[in-house]
Image (cartoon, grey):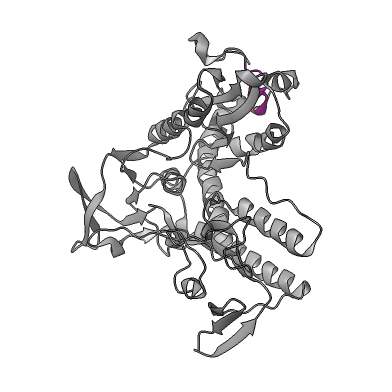
Amino acid sequence: GGTCVNVGCIPKKLFHHAAMAGEGIHDAQAFGWKVTKEGHDWNKLVDSVRDYIRSLNFGYKVQLREKKVKYLNKLGTLVDEHSVKCVDKKGREETITAERILVAVGGRPKQLDCPGGELAITSDDMFFLDSPPGKTLVVGASYVALECASFLTGFGYDTTVMVRSILLRGFDQQMAEMVGSAMEKLGTKFIHGSVPRKLEKTESGKIRVFFDNGEDDFDTVLAAVGRDADTSGLGLEAVGVELNRSGKLRTTHMQTNIPSVFGIGDCVEGVPELTPVAIHLGRNLAERLYGKATNPVDMRCVPTAVFAGLEYCCVGLSEEDAKEELGDNLEVYHTAFTPLQWTVPDNREYNQCYCKVLVDKSRNERVVGIHQVSPEAGEIVQAYGVAMKLGMTFADLKALVGIHPTIGEELCLLAEPKSSGKDAVKSGC
């Protein structure tokens, strides 16, 4: 199942839901439920997630067998344009040949580049720790870093995020700051403008981290500083396959410069590192090679989400990119709001949720970006990718009669443009 099933999206989302369930216990008290929050059992969660992942692994093997796909648990290396040498764990070799070879090896997390960096774990390790992580330092500001920090805070662990520069590089920065602010309000701490310079083990077994403006001891250090394509050792260079500086395959519609060698997913240059994208590319390539499809995947308007304590989902351009592309033709409609389920619990902050729609005034206010920070934002925003591909305008969005009372209807109720300078906080239900 690759990264997503084993050490990525699936365990990450389950850990996120586990943390949200803890928040729900507090909310339940305000709704009259006589429940108490007695702490979190890390080992119970890890065992439950492991069991589910094993069931997925088994299911995929069954599907491969049913589809008459031969599965080899071996390491493959390209020998030539049509041959792959396979080695199993006992060192036994065999060479297989094929008309076409598809490389879909994904990526691996980067380690910390400092003395003692090997003391840090990565997201590959986080979901299978045999003991609770305790006081944790998360190094990095990517969505992986923020998601892990969020659920650790939700479980009650003392969690700090060390940020070199900005949160969620490449995402809309107004929304990124909202995600960070929400995390801080829930208890996650941040060290800004710093990187670890050295890690060392103390006599007590903790990890002492020396950074630009101080030092501190932690039980666990999680490196979430990006990923590298897992292409080294595959023999790609020897066959002549072109790679970029980070080891990703250079392709045209998933075909490399070697006509018989193809690539999909995170190991390909210019492809969003998202599981649904890799799946879509794989299906499309199979259809183009062996079916009736002729068009490559349309990579416009791919929704993506950050499952931090307060979810963030977006589709289309960030406000920064829209300003650069559209200039004065950009307008932004926005609002801050409070979900109905947050109006009763006394610990929830009003108007912490937010959504905005970016439009191109020169094209009849065609929607070019949608952004939302709220509970279940991913469930709400992703469907708008279809409408945006079909040329949805702001008038089309306004014409939709929303379901009341829901978080999703807030996008249909937008009216206040940022250019007005007026307060966009919603009042009323």
The quarter of the picture where residue 314 lies is top right
Residue 91: image location, x then y, percent: 49, 89
Does residue 411 show up magenta in the picture? yes
Q: Residue at left 39%, top 44%? A: 141
Residues 53 and 373: in front is 373
Front residue (pair 210, 250): 250
Q: Quarter holding the N terminus?
A: bottom right
Which residue is at 62% across, 78% downward? 82
The magenta segment is 408-414
Figure check: 28 above or below 234: above
* Image coords of residue 63 (percent x, y): 73, 69
Rendered view: 399 above or below 158: above
Residue at image coords 52%, 28%: 325
- Residue 166 lies left or right of residue 401; in this view the side is left
Q: Is residue 64 left or right of residue 407?
A: right
Instruction: Reply above or below: 78 against 280.
Output: below
**Does 6 sit left or right of 177 as displayed?**
right
Q: Residue at x 48, y 39 (%)?
A: 309
**Is residue 143 something that shows in the picture?**
yes
Q: Nearer the viewer, residue 188 or 9?
A: 9
Q: Position of residue 426 (x, y in %)?
A: 56, 15
